[in-house]
Amino acid sequence: MTEPLLKVDNLVQHFKVSRNFTVKAVNGVSFEIYPGETYGLVGESGSGKTTIGRSIIRLYDPTAGEIFFNRDKISGVLNDKVRRMLRKNMQMIFQDPMSSLNPRKKIGDIIGEGLDIHGLYSTRKERNRIIGEMLEKVGLSPAHAERYPHQFSGGQRQRVGIARALVMKPKLIIADECISALDVSIQAQVVNLMKDIQAETGCAYLFIAHDLSMVKYISDRIGVLHLGNLVETGTTQEIFSKPTHQYTKSLLSAVPCSNPVIERNRRRSL
Amino acid sequence: MGISMNEKIILSVENLDITFRTNAGNVHAIRGVNFDLPAGKTLALVGESGSGKSVTMKAVAGLLDDNATINSGKIFYRQADGNVIDLLTLSKKNLRRTINGQQIAMIFQDPMTSLDPTMRIGEQIAETILLHKKISTSDANKRAVELLQLVGLNEPEKRVKNYPHQLSGGQRQRVVIAIALSCEPKILICDEPTTALDVTIQARILDLIQDLQAKMGLSVIFITHDLGVVARVADFVKVMYAGKIIEAGTVDEIFFDPRHPYTWGLLSAMPDLETNDDRLYSIPGSPPNLLHEPKGDAFAARNQFAMKIDEREEPPMFQISETHFAATWLLHPDAPKVEMPAQLRERLARARKAANLQ
Ligand SMILES: Nc1ncnc2c1ncn2[C@@H]1O[C@H](COP(=O)(O)OP(=O)(O)OP(=O)(O)O)[C@@H](O)[C@H]1O
Ligand SMILES: Nc1ncnc2c1ncn2[C@@H]1O[C@H](COP(=O)(O)OP(=O)(O)OP(=O)(O)O)[C@@H](O)[C@H]1O
Ligand SMILES: [Mg+2]
Ligand SMILES: [Mg+2]
């Protein structure tokens, strides 16, 4: 049996907002992700999806629980070697692209930053070629490298975040609502690209989303999160054919369709 | 001043044309956009990422970036007293003081950009209310809690004390919606307002907006790439491509009888829970780089049905019905008859059948 690439064991993440208000964002969540696999994490707004992603990549210090990546323990205090391994092999695509892109840096340098830090090219020319190709793969153009983040549309910025993560060829990508601002055609292009890169490099994805049709399409297994607890987990097939938890059922029944007449009637019947 | 505009129209954009200056040259982002918003109705603006949806609406709200130049165009707005003004003739300051927020409110695509990171969210909502209404601070605070409740935030009395970074993506998005609704505007412009929301909360927000529409005659412009949302809320749909509106119609016309090959591609790319193909359909190629103005039809290079003329001349808007228009040479009387791709045709036939239409 292969070993999991990521093992999250009883993760707890609480935030103390004030003396008498602590947000219990994540309350003992456990799951594993295997190499080359896509694990979909779905759940209501505020259920703790982003928090789990940020705890795994160590933007937060977990309140309790353990996380293993590549057999190394990555919760608790990190030594330099593990920290460096983590920065190269795990990337996150952030939900809010504007606040995750440095407004004073050109797009080319934002995408190239990881390449620079880890010296992943031999000449300047090679660096710019890698960046230009990555921009094209996400449906932008090499000429965009000269622009600043605020000079892009919402969906273009989101693709800059995707390019920045994919260019590192990491082992695990935490993709937090990474296609939510894209129109369907470009969503399809990006999802196809993510699948191609997975086939090529064998990377794994933690795919956080609320759009069930996309999650169904891309995921091997799915976890359903509710109020900081995993209430249901299984293969995509299992979750979609026999949902057991009430929340999963309600998510499935509310999936909108693109039929204006049916949608109008649905509203009337509420 | 006596600008005439059909009484039923609250907002009319005419021939809007905008360029951005960048390091790499001028980007001609908006290339002649025209549309009317009938009062009390919902108009959806859809189209590829980068096609100019947000820029068009920022022009209406007077919030264009500094490197933008408006080359031409008029944006007529009918005020409550019936007077029609061209918003582009007002100074930015004047626009902000008299129109923005109170009469036209915009919910931005990126919620963080419209929230003040150093201020508690309750204070931010109350501040907006106090700007537009003469009520006491404590009443404004109460109203802030009510609004948070309306948009579905749990424990709103506690949440008002949160700073924006302490909220999840979808919670932030809902705070921004609450702020926009707090001043009871006449026109609400929503730029991807529900992208970060799961279907159950999304439905709640859409219902809320539709209720306000019924109660207060609110007119709504919805920018969204989610065609399920469009199907649910829109009366009229405009499809944008490369800085122009290339198809316009009622929601039924666009979903059941699309005529522009770009609209065909958009509808074909939509996954549903029945999709089992190994690869999703995406429109081949990428949109033109508006640093170099395309010659002819901007969609030609990606259009499998393109004809010779598409490379030379831009198609005009052809009229299909009283409400339905599309800019493609395929609709010229002399054009060969071209059918939409078979797969889409079957899908639309299924959709019509499900809707009990012919
Ligand atoms: N830094 C923080 N301080 C305090 N509370 C926080 C912080 N970050 C998140 N929270 C709270 O934790 C809960 C979970 O938030 P999280 O961002 O993980 O939700 P999510 O599932 O990603 O939701 P969405 O789909 O809306 O993005 C929310 O109630 C949120 O308000
Ligand atoms: N300040 C700016 N400087 C230069 N170019 C800009 C600026 N703002 C927008 N653009 C460009 O104008 C075009 C239209 O942008 P806009 O934001 O309107 O797109 P959009 O249709 O809203 O796309 P999305 O669905 O991705 O949000 C894009 O090509 C974008 O890169
Ligand atoms: Mg989130
Ligand atoms: Mg936009």
Image (cartoon, coloured by chain):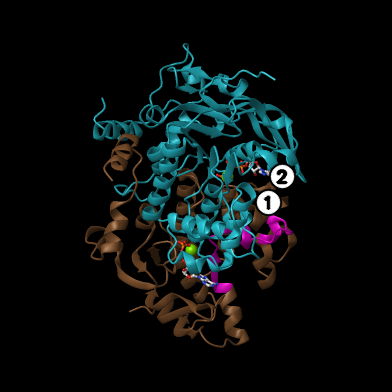
Chain colours: A brown, B cyan
Q: Residue at x 38, y 63 (%)?
A: A43
Q: Amino acid at mark 1?
A: His
What element does badge 2 sit on? loop
Q: Which is more toward the observer, B56 or B117?
A: B117
State whether label 2 is within 8 Å of ligand 2. Answer: yes
Q: Residue at label 1? A: A150
Dot 2: chain letter: B
Residue A171 in the image: x percent, y percent?
50, 71
| Residue at figure coordinates x 56%, y 20% from the top left | B315
Asked whether residue B50 appears in the rendered view, the answer is no
Mark 1, chain letter?
Answer: A
Query: In the displayed structure, would residue B236 be above or below residue A228?
Result: above
Which residue type does callout 2 highlight? Asp
Binning the other alpha carbons within 10 Å of mark 2 as few (below 14), some (14 to 19) or many (20 upward) gives: few
Q: Of tags 2 and 1, which is closer to the observer?
A: 2
Q: Is mark 1 within 8 Å of ligand 2?
A: yes
Q: Secondary structure at mark 1?
A: helix
Residue reaching furthest top? Answer: B334
- Judge whether residue A96 is colored magenta: yes
Cβ atoms under marks 2 and 1 closer than 8 Å: yes
Question: Do the residues at pointers 2 and 1 share their chain?
Answer: no
Q: Is residue B16 left or right of residue A55?
A: right
**In which quadrant of the rendered view does residue A126 lie?**
bottom right
Q: Which residue is mark 2?
A: B65
The foreground one among B198 and A5 is: B198
- Looking at the picture, does residue B16 appear above or below residue A184? above
* Vertical placement of residue B224 versus A218, above or below: above
Left or right: where B239 falls relative to B113: left
> Which quarter of the figure is the N terminus of chain B placed in?
top right
Q: Range of the magenta residues?
A: A88-110
- How many other residues sit within 10 Å of disc 1, few (<14), some (14-19) or many (≥20)? some
